Image: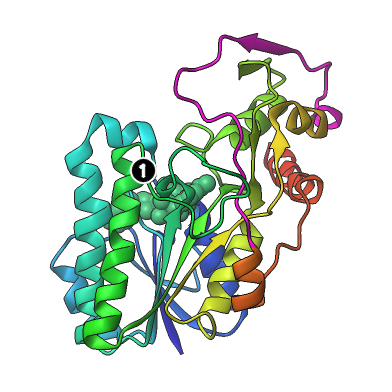
Amino acid sequence: MKVAVTGGAGFIGSHIVDQCLAAGYDVFVIDSLATGKRENLNHKAVFYEVDITSSDIQTIFEKEKPDFLIHEAAQASVPGSLKDAVGDATTNVVGTVNLLEASRLTGVRKVVYASSAAVYGNPEYTGIDELHHKQPLSPYGVSKYVPEFYLYVYQHLYGLKYTAFRYANVYGERQDPNGEGGVVSIFVDRVNAGQELSVFGDGEQTRDFIYVEDVARANLMALTAGDNQIFNISTNRKTSVNELIELLRPYAKQPLTVHYEKPREGDILHSYLDNTKAKKGLGWEPHYSLAQGLEKTMGYYQKKS
Ligand SMILES: NC(=O)c1ccc[n+]([C@@H]2O[C@H](COP(=O)([O-])OP(=O)(O)OC[C@H]3O[C@@H](n4cnc5c(N)ncnc54)[C@H](O)[C@@H]3O)[C@@H](O)[C@H]2O)c1
């Protein structure tokens, strides 16, 4: 069985590639290296340095004939989508449609798509379940949401099966702290460099931090389960930024200092995603607590430095 993984040189995609190969799948990667890195590529996978909006996608799919597509490639930054809304929509919407066309024309059995908690916008309640209202608050939130409709349409018109995942805040090894990595990768980087941590607000804001290996495992499970459904991939738990800091404190080589700044306007205070549907419909649940995921992440960076 062959799996095409887009974004396989990126953070989450590279973990999916590793797990697919370990499970015995043949894998090829499509990545433009826009934010991905060659060093993240697993050398056992064939690599195409190609943009997902390119007409080359059709040619590659005709040659490789994948059974499955796991689609992680994206313009994955909220600020990036504000700076270049056209570029964001081109990659995330047009790129996805281009892949769906190639998939249906070459007989792909199923597409697994990385959507985002950003589709929900401001929480009406927590834990946010899949039926919660969708009111994205950024071009990125819209461009991650629109492909969910295309997936439905391609299933309806052509019988192309899909699973879409709305990820919470993913963290772990290979997340780029210089990109839009999010608070965990920035803090991990600063703790390792012996630098002060900056927090917007009082640190009591909460998020749902899910470890990347749990996210990758959900993708593998979706190759054989959860057809034509959308699932939150999350821990169902809220963790405050202050709690995160306390979990990281033992790893600091010198006393950790934290600087509290004014809250950022528009930041959501509390958010976590309900994962009941994924537990029931996919048989998936996270295996890693935040403490365990952080231990693996810190171990990786401390070995690297
Ligand atoms: N990291 C998170 O917390 C999170 C949360 C919700 C959803 N997601 C989604 O998960 C997916 C993976 O995100 P990530 O955090 O690993 O980001 P990432 O930036 O590390 O990975 C994205 C990959 O896509 C590639 N790419 C970008 N534009 C491309 C294009 N036009 N053609 C081909 N390749 C292109 C990049 O080079 C990169 O390797 C994305 O779809 C993102 O929207 C991530």
From the top left corner, tell me how far across and down residue 241 is, in percent.
69, 29
Residue at x-position 34% and y-position 55%: 145
Depth check: give the residue in front, 219 or 303. Answer: 219
Which residue is tagged 1? 136
The residue most toward the right is 250
From the top left corner, tell me how far across and down residue 139 is, in percent.
28, 40
Residue 254 shown in magenta: yes
Residue at x-position 51% and y-position 68%: 17
From the top left corner, tell me how far across and down residue 283 is, in percent.
66, 77
Helix, strand or loop status at disc 1? loop
Residue at x-position 72% and y-position 38%: 239
* Quarter where residue 288 is shown: bottom right
**Above/below status of 265 relative to 233:** above
Q: How many marks overall? A: 1
**Above/below status of 137 relative to 39:** above
In the rendered view of the protein, which quadrant contains the C terminus? top right
Residue at x-position 22% and y-position 48%: 89
Depth check: give the residue in front, 206 or 88. Answer: 206
* Quarter where residue 93 is shown: bottom left
**Above/below status of 242 relative to 263:** below
Please identify the dominant SS of the magenta region: loop
**Is residue 37 in sight in this rendering?**
no
Q: Is mark 1 within 8 Å of ligand 1?
A: no
Which residues fall within the magenta stretch?
249-275
